[in-house]
């Protein structure tokens, strides 16, 4: 990806069957268009440079069929794997927890949901007619990315909206330029997984 100008906004398209979203920077410029292939036994995500989908920059593929402990590998244009994001299995049932892993299979970053109660309240109230339609305005989870020393790097927050279609990514600490693509791709994959879980 290009040099990123924070904050970034991820906006889902709610008018299509596919689970697509656009990433725009602080100036409103599109930095990525993310498309999830439908009806696949394994996750298959494509990241294009824009909505025209003429230039494929990256792809993300699951290493196994749908599972709580699946890992999702990042591939560049040439098909070279350069990292992955892995869910922390059953530990993620209460609060979402993931690890971003580099090309040497070493853990680089941790991604943790900041407040697990938000998801619980959203799920409970989401079952109540009419009231369930409004939970997107009141229960908005946030996720913090930290390095191995525990220092916060970026925060991803769901924004108040009727359909839960917008997320804001803010930089809160120093980020290594070599790792920004891995962090971005990891969060993009995590959003798709967490939205499906509710």
Image (spheres, grey):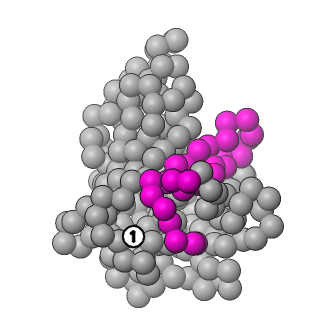
Q: Residue at x 73, y 41 (%)?
A: 17
Q: Is residue 115 above or below residue 76?
A: above
Kindly report the secondary structure that dominates the magenta region of the rendered protein: loop
Residue 68 located left or right of residue 37? left
Q: Can residue 164 be found in the magenta stretch?
A: no
86 or 15: nearer the viewer: 15
180 or 95: nearer the viewer: 180
35 or 86: nearer the viewer: 35
Q: Residue at x 32, y 33 (%)?
A: 118
Question: Residue 37 appears at what percent x and percent y?
Answer: 71, 56
Q: Residue at x 73, y 35 (%)?
A: 15
Say if residue 124 shows up in the picture.
yes
Q: Residue at x 41, y 88 (%)?
A: 104
User: What segment is highlighted magenta in the picture?
Assistant: 1-27
Q: Is residue 172 above or below residue 148?
A: above
Question: Residue 103 appears at what percent x and percent y?
Answer: 45, 85
Query: Callout 1 environment at 10 Å: few (<14), some (14 to 19), or many (20+)?
Result: many
Q: Can residue 7 be found in the magenta stretch?
A: yes
- For label 1, the SS is strand
Say if residue 192 shows up in the picture.
no
Instruction: Classify the position of the N terminus by image quarter.
Output: bottom right
Residue highlighted by disc 1: 100
Question: Residue 50 appears at what percent x and percent y?
Answer: 71, 60
Task: Find the residue positioned furthest to the top.
Answer: 130
- Residue 145 falls in which quadrant of the image? bottom left
């Amino acid at each position: 990806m290009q040099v990123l100008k924070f904050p970034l906004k991820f906006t889902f398209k709610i008018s299509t069957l596919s689970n697509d979203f656009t990433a725009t920077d602080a100036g409103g410029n599109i930095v990525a268009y993310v498309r999830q292939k439908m009806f696949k036994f394994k996750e298959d995500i494509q990241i294009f440079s824009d909505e025209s989908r003429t230039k494929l920059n990256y792809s993300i593929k699951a290493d196994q069929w749908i599972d709580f402990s699946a890992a999702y590998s990042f591939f560049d244009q040439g098909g070279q794997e350069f990292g992955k994001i892995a869910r922390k299995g059953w530990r993620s049932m209460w609060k979402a927890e993931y690890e971003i892993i580099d090309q040497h299979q070493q853990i680089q970053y941790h991604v943790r949901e900041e407040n697990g109660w938000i998801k619980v309240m959203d799920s409970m109230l989401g079952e109540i007619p009419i009231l369930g339609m409004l939970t997107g305005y009141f229960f908005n989870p946030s996720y913090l990315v930290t390095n191995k020393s525990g220092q916060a790097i970026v925060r991803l927050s769901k924004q108040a909206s009727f359909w839960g279609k917008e997320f804001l990514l803010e930089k809160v600490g120093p980020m290594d330029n070599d790792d920004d693509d891995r962090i971005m791709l990891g969060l993009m994959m995590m959003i798709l997984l967490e939205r499906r879980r509710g």
